[in-house]
Amino acid sequence: MTWFNKQSRLVQLLLLLIPFVNWVTELIVRWSTFAKKGGLLRLIICLIVTFGGGIILGYIDLIWVLLFKKLCLQ
């Protein structure tokens, strides 16, 4: 998560724009955040990302990063 936040906005947007890279980025960021902080909501989001909703959530995160400079539901 901290690695993603340290990247420039352009790199973050590119990571979230490309479909397969988007899903892999979501997996890494979400599961690492869950491993560090825990929580039921984070676990649910991790499972959604892992089993099919990762690309959709990635595009939602793309818009969220544009607007608020952080991932949604973080």
Image (cartoon, grey):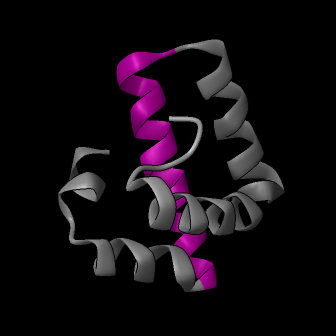
Which residue occupies 66% across, 69% down? 59
User: Is 74 placed above or below 42 here?
Assistant: below
Most common SS among magenta residues: helix
Can you tell which quarter of the image residue 40 is in? top right
Q: Does any portion of residue 41 appear in the rendered image?
A: yes
Q: Does any portion of residue 25 appear in the rendered image?
A: no
Which residue occupies 41% across, 50% down? 70
User: Is 61 placed above or below 39 here?
Assistant: below
Which residue occupies 43% across, 48% down? 29
In this rendering, position of residue 45 left or right of residue 26? right
Depth check, front residue: 60 or 1:
60
Which residue occupies 52% across, 66% down? 24
User: Is 9 placed above or below 68 here?
Assistant: below
* Quarter of the rendering occupied by the N terminus: top left
**Is residue 73 a member of the stretch shown in magenta?**
no
In this rendering, position of residue 73 left or right of residue 53? left
Q: Residue 62, how many percent across, how many down?
A: 55, 68
Point out the stretch of residues depicted in magenta.
19-38
User: Is 4 placed above or below 73 here?
Assistant: below
Depth check, front residue: 63 or 46:
63
